[in-house]
Amino acid sequence: MDKGKGFPPLFLFPVFLFLSSGWLSASISFEVKEADSHFWAGEKIERHIMLTNDSPVTEEVIFTWIGGLVLGPFPETLAIAQKEEKRFSLAPGEKKNILVILKFPEVKSRMKYLLQVKVSGNSTSTRSFYYQIFPHPEFASLAAYLNEKGVGVYDPSGRVTSIFKELGVSFSLINNAWGWDYFSGGFIFVGSGAFLKENNPFFNIISGKVANGARVFCFTQNSSEDEKFVASEGNFFFLADTEEEKAGLLLLPRGKGWIIFSPFLTAEGFFQEPLSQVIFEKALKRMIELEPHSWCKAGYLGPTDDELFSFLKEIGFANFPSPQFLITSLEREKEIEECFYSKRVPLVIFAFGVEKKSAAILSKEIPEIKLKREDSPPLGLKGLFREKRTILLRLPVSLSEVKKDKVWRSTIVQFLTAFGIPLNEF
């Protein structure tokens, strides 16, 4: 006998109990056969729940399930959209398969859907199963933009090209070194296996393209040999909505361009896994938003053979002859004074360790920002730099320590990038 179908779609039900993934000790055990948990909004799925009577007597079973979107933090509130109850007898050792059909609602952002199953006989067991519901990605407008800008693909495995064909993205497939000499597009996509030893020439070619302003997306590489690329580059910082979704994108500024690397996105099974498509949509949007480094249009105030200049070159600095702003170290006091006197372009000054400002520099009332490891640029930094035209960045460690620490390097890159964004307003 079935009961409870057609339950009001937005009945709010507080979920207080039985939210563990295990089940209580009971005479009736049960399990859901399917393990997948990522689905599209509006999708309909089947769950097969197998019940087993582990007791020596016949059980009169009441099987109830409810499903709905989870609203708010714990204690969770469930917007029940579905509910069903079945009653039946189960002999000792007998198994029964019950089909549950879930209809996921339309959502505008990622949401959690809960299926809660309750089995009552001589005792009661309850289990909760969570599913992630995603809105459908909008690839059409992204594909149209990419088609205008030009897309190059290096794809040893052949899987990335099948994705672009399905999404309607036009591309140039270039799997040989000389072909890249003729590619002038702004976007490059790299499939797995690109950084194996036999493909090393490609890495050098791509590095040159990035330095000149290209934006490159690297799918997850498939061996420890490939991953040496990430380890050797350093300076990555994360672009992740949550750790739970494993959608962390690693963003690396290099020269005038950018590299985005996904540790979790493979081209294999791309259209079978909603999360893969969500990550890729996010990566494409980020690539389109990125602009060539305007902080690369900076100049260096001081000799080009000193330690700070060498470090800046390592993280992608290009010394422009007609810069929009200048970078220097606190020890270049004479050059800083001349810059103030001549009213040259804005100035970013680095102070490492215990370096102190001289009386002459103190008299200029230069704003000082004390950086900490893993700091992010404050919201008012652009406006402060625009107003004062000079900023002192003070680090508590020496430059030699910074050069050996990837986190410090990433922090400095983020601050320099933040300074560069508004400079066309000077």
Image: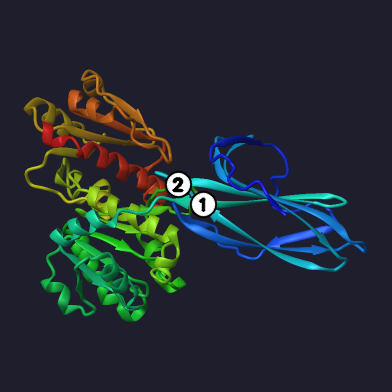
- The residue where tag 2 is placed is 110
Above or below: residue 236 compared with residue 344: below
Question: What percent of the width, then of the height, locates residue 144?
Answer: 18, 58
Above or below: residue 218 compared with residue 420: below
Q: Amino acid at mark 2?
A: Arg
Above or below: residue 363 compared with residue 392: above
Q: Residue at x 16, y 40 (%)?
A: 301
Question: What percent of the width, then of the height, locates residue 366?
Answer: 25, 23
- The residue where tag 1 is placed is 132
Earlier residue among tags 1 and 2: 2
* Labels in figure, total: 2
Left or right, 3 with reference to 232: right
Question: What percent of the width, then of the height, locates residue 86?
Answer: 72, 54
Quarter of the figure that contains the C terminus: top left
Q: Residue at x 29, y 69 (%)?
A: 166
Q: Residue at x 48, y 57 (%)?
A: 39
Question: What percent of the width, then of the height, locates residue 95?
Answer: 78, 68
**Circle number at residue 16:** none
For marks 1 and 2, give the CA distance: 7 Å
Q: Amino acid at mark 1?
A: Gln
